[in-house]
Image: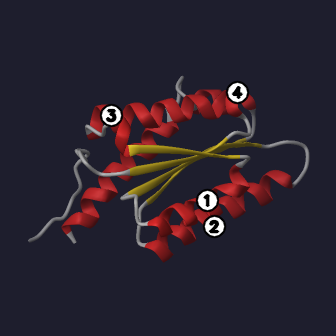
Amino acid sequence: MNIIEGSFEAKGKKFAIVVSRFNHFIVDSLLEGAIDALKRSGNVQDSDITVIRVPGAYELPLVAKKAAKTGKFDAIIAIGAVIRGGTPHFDFVAGESNKGLAQVCLDSEIPVSFGVITTDSIEQAIERAGTKAGNKGAEAALGALEMVNVLAQL
């Protein structure tokens, strides 16, 4: 039986982190978690990480697509926070961001790790940005590290 499984070590691999500025008080912690995970778990150097800032989560897919088309990156990590408000705006932004990023991954055949948290409250967002529920930015980076290594084996 053959089992293909990725590790986290990704020295020399290039990563783009596309990060939303909206809800920056949450997103900044997610970004820090992602960078820390790349460096600690993946042994990735600063020079192999490119951070690209965009206005909000809705803009993440377009920039991720453009980054994928450059051929410079082995994986893309999308970071953002969409917090439910009193209107249906949340559903549109969260849904389109998710669909767009998934499409970029499939079209480009480059891992696009989903580090966009979608929560009902600011409290839930804080929990997912490094407190009770861990750091979802770090988890997205670990997913990207593992996927880079799985794809290299196929």
Give x and y (percent) for residue 138: 44, 37
Mark 2 vs 1, N-terminal side: 1
Disc marking residue 100: none
Which callout, 2 or 1, points to the residue nearer the camera? Answer: 1
Q: How far apart are marks 3 and 4 (CA)?
A: 28 Å
Q: Mark 3 points at which residue?
A: 39
Q: Residue 123 — which label? A: 4
Separation of disc 4 and disc 1 at Cα? 29 Å
**Relative height, residue 57 to residue 46 (above, below):** below
Image position, residue 44 (x, y; %): 30, 40
Give the mark nearest the N terminus, 4 or 1.
1
Choose between 138 and 45: the one closer to the eye. Answer: 45
Relative to 123, is 98 above or below?
Answer: below
Q: In this view, does 67 lie to the left or right of 58?
A: left
Mark 2 → mark 4, Cα distance in angstroms? 25 Å
* Residues tagged 3 and 4 counted as in contact (Cβ below 8 A): no
Tag in front: 2 or 4? 2
Q: How crowded is mark 1: few (under 14 residues within 10 Å), some or many (20 or more)?
A: some
